[in-house]
Amino acid sequence: MGVAVVIGAQWGDEAKGKVVDILSQQADLTARYNGGDNAGHTVVNPYGTFKLRLTPNGFANPKTTCIIGPGVVVNLNTLMDELRIIAQAGIALDERLWVSPRCHVVMPYHPRVEAIYEQAKGASSTGTTGRGMGPVYADKVSYNGIRLADLADEAVFTEKLHIQLEIKNALLRSFGQEPLELQTVRDEKLAQYTQVHHVVRESFGILQEALHRGASIVLEGAQGALLDNDWGTYPFCTASTTLAGGAAGGLGLAPRWIDRVIGVAKAYTTRVGRGPMPSELLDETGESIRRAGAEFGTVTGRPRRCGWFDAELVRFTSQLNGCTEIVLTKLDVLDNLPLLKVGVGYCPREGRRSHYWEGDARWLEGCQPDYIELEGWQQPTTGIREWDKLPRLAQAYVRKVESLIETPISMVSVGPGRDETIPVPLQ
Ligand code: GDP
Ligand code: IMO
Ligand code: MG
């Protein structure tokens, strides 16, 4: 397999977790390189159903080393919960897990500062997951962060926390909120660090060793390319880089090592939170997709906004990430629809179509997709495992999407389980 990066090619929740779980069966090493516990990945494998946010989805393979790289921000509560859930499932992970000491720590003031910003913005708020991502990454890039390594030294940690609380408490007070107490926060974080310090260890050496011996490596992107801080629908995006290139900085792996970039896209479009979504369906069809796809956020339980597949977006994210292939997921969710639409481009102007990258989020808000219509197959696909057995109209849908996004589709997914996948022959 070489080195494969798995990224979300839409607005997140494309079923990256499932794809990484499948690939990890053959992987020597799996690593997360961005985001934090704003991610929510549901994985269904022989050990059970897991809803994890931080741990790389290679956790279920006893032979896979798992790394949480420096690009990830760590909420210690979540990390502790996940170590417990995985241990309770009878999976030995602690010996295989490396969490970089360079990771920044989500502190109790981060979600509270985020809430102040979100409330102040009112109708123009981002609609975040409330996990403190904006403020923790802001502290990181403005040299105000606290890293896991700082927690190893009580005096260093206390001094840094003291300074941050002086500033953060002033803000909390000025918005009429209770300040945080130094001793309470310090004791809680130090106690949590003690619980996990055995997995906090520098990962650069083992990653380099794995690369040089030609190991099979899966790099797991969180969120989706349209939530990227630079290329997403800013400010309706997330705080970290969600692109394949983020794996390089977020892990300490030179770009030249990357062999494959696997984009994961749903057979339709979803989005959680605010921001433009040109192919959104606000009618009964959108509702029926939400029901069939169980489209509710893993982290917040919010209903996900649903719409038709938007080929302009996925063609763009495929170019942006250099996708060598796309895995098309949740095809089964479309099984009952008599008519399907696919967005092929926006707002014809002066005889030419506009592209996603020509404007910003406000501009995209005004864009209407042009659609093509395809006949639905109206048959169940979940039990199917071979391309040739898929209904002809389902094959036609996949091939149409493939030609519009100008990237080969290597696999389609027709259910949450590991085996509910169909390899797609190259055309
Ligand atoms: P991620 O954040 O990209 O890992 O995706 P999520 O786990 O947040 O959301 C994907 C959801 O779809 C999960 O609940 C999966 O169990 C489920 N799922 C994955 N693949 C399929 C599929 O092909 N069909 C259906 N019906 N559900 C799927
Ligand atoms: P996975 O890895 C879907 C969205 C939020 C919000 C915006 C900013 O499961 O695909 P944040 O809390 O990151 O500051 O919120 O980004 N968002 C996601 N949407 N899947 C995710 O992760 C997401 N992580 C963040 O809903 O619109
Ligand atoms: Mg998710």
Image: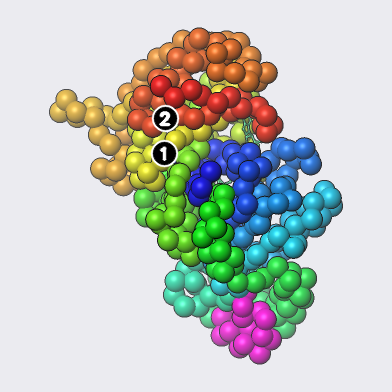
In front of the other: 24 or 239: 24
Q: Is residue 161 magenta?
A: yes
Residue 229's image quarter? bottom left
105 in relation to 337, above or below: below
Give the amino acid type for the residue marked by disc 2 in the picture: Pro
Residue drawn where x is 79% and y is 41% of the image: 47
Residue 116 in percent (x, y) is at 54, 64
Residue drawn where x is 48% and y is 41% of the image: 262
In front of the other: 87 or 302: 87
Numbered label attached to residue 408: 2
Residue 190 in percent (x, y) is at 73, 78
Q: Is residue 415 magenta?
A: no
Residue drawn where x is 66% and y is 57% of the image: 65
Residue 110 appears in the figure? no
**Residue placed under numbered mark 1 in the picture:** 324
Determine the main secondary structure of the stretch shown in magenta: helix
Residue interval drawn in magenta: 148-165
Q: CA distance from mark 2 to mark 1?
A: 7 Å
Q: Secondary structure at mark 2?
A: loop
* 2 and 1 marks in contact (CB < 8 Å): yes
Numbered label attached to residue 86: none
* 346 with respect to 154 (left or right): left
Give the amino acid type for the residue marked by disc 1 in the picture: Thr
